[in-house]
Image (tube, rainbow, N blue to C red):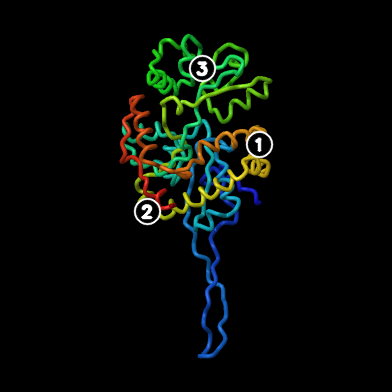
């Protein structure tokens, strides 16, 4: 496996690119000489690959395993793509990368994408969904479990400020007065939960339970998706212009990406160690953590509908859940036809 190239700050794009994947070499037979002369095989120039820039939603971790595998195995190149991968982070707004022309496609949260469409007039389309079930949920200690929304009544729940509206909607959907739950700010640090200063927190159920386990505690969790707040996550988003001008490349990206995820989930423990010195180098996270994450996300991504699926039911549920928090999504904001081409 070759190591992905890190583009420096002096270069026009920050991120990783697949090394040595400029295109595919094909050979064609050329008839030489008069009739009866022996045919010879001569090389033809490689067909130029289509450049495509992908903006990720977060820093390099197991959340994006399928893409790393597809890059390292050359599967995007096999589909005729020259893919540039841009990591995300706390200061990266994926939709902004699209609208500024810095990326052709991005992984986003559907609420921010739909708000950009409805409030800012952004010409964006959702063409796929990595997480069929959003991994965000309520995490608590196994010794004092919060197993349902009803268990939150009278308890203290830590929630990132940006997610308070979603939690209040989840409570209302379950017949619970949001005022009956004490909601305090959360800074993505499980220490207050471990110390018993709060009863539960809102976080990625695929990751934070591992952190809690390293502190000698066991965690339990449930997804907001399981209790009525049924939205996708890591939605694949493009501008309407890119959808028109690079449609074939987008279908090729979906095909190679699905292949990477299928390969990854054959054994979720297999690939994280192989990426320790490349994609995961310098992240500060352990490979055991990445394995835990990868195993936990499998049932949220790999569903019978197929990886990246946008089913009528899934779209309707996402629209309904967003409506509960005052975000007016509509079916025309989703284009299901590209994933449908994958079969």
Residue in the image at 46% along x and 39% along y = 107
The local crowd at label 3, few if under 14, some if 14 to 19, many if 20 or more residues have their Cα within 10 Å, is many
Please name the residue that numbered disc 1 is placed on.
Answer: 282
Total numbered circles: 3
> Is 6 left or right of 258, judged from the image as shown?
right
Sequence-earlier tag: 3 or 1: 3
Helix, strand or loop at disc 1?
loop
Q: In the rendered structure, find residue 245 and report the number of the disc placed on it.
A: 2
Residue furthest to the front: 304
Q: Earlier in the sequence, mark 3 or mark 2?
A: 3
Residue 206: percent from left, percent from top: 56, 31
As drawn, is 249 to the left or to the right of 88? Answer: left
| Mark whose residue sits in front, 3 or 2 | 3
In percent of width and height, residue 185 lies at 50, 16
Which circle marks residue 168 in the picture? Answer: none
Residue drawn where x is 55% and y is 58% of the image: 22
Residue ID at (41%, 11%): 179
Q: Looking at the image, which is closer to me, 244 or 233?
A: 233
Q: Quadrant of residue 142?
A: top right
In the image, 233 versus 220, the foreground residue is: 220
* Left or right: 19, with 317 as reference point: right
Label 3, label 1: how many angstroms apart (C-alpha)?
Answer: 29 Å
């Amino acid at each position: 496996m070759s190591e992905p190239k890190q583009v420096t700050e002096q270069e026009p794009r920050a991120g990783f690119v697949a090394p040595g994947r400029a295109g595919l070499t094909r050979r064609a037979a050329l008839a030489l000489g008069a009739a009866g002369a022996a045919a010879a095989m001569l090389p033809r120039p490689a067909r130029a690959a289509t450049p495509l820039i992908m903006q990720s939603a977060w820093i390099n971790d197991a959340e994006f395993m399928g893409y790393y595998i597809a890059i390292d195995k050359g599967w995007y190149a096999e589909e005729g793509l020259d893919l540039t991968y841009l990591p995300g982070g706390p200061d990266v707004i994926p939709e902004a990368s699209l609208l500024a022309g810095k990326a052709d496609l991005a992984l986003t949260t559907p609420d921010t994408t739909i708000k950009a469409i409805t409030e800012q007039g952004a010409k964006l389309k959702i063409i796929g969904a990595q997480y069929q079930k959003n991994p965000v949920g309520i995490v608590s200690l196994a010794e004092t479990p919060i197993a349902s929304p009803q268990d939150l009544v009278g308890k203290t729940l830590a929630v990132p400020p940006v997610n308070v509206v979603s939690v209040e909607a989840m409570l209302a959907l379950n017949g619970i007065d949001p005022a009956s739950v004490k909601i305090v700010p959360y800074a993505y640090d499980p220490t207050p939960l471990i110390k018993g200063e709060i009863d539960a927190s809102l976080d990625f159920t695929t990751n934070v339970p591992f952190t809690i386990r390293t502190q000698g505690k066991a965690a339990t969790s449930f997804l907001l998706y399981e209790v009525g707040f049924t939205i996708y996550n890591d939605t694949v988003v493009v501008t309407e212009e890119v959808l028109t001008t690079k449609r074939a490349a987008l279908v090729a990206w979906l095909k190679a990406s699905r292949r990477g995820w299928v390969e990854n989930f054959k054994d979720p423990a297999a690939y994280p160690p192989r990426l320790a010195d490349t994609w995961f180098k310098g992240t500060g996270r352990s490979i055991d953590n990445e394995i835990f994450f990868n195993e936990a996300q499998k049932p949220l991504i790999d569903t019978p509908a197929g990886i990246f699926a946008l089913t009528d039911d899934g779209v309707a549920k996402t629209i309904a859940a967003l409506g509960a928090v005052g975000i007016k999504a509509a079916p025309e904001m989703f284009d299901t036809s590209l994933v449908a081409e994958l079969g």
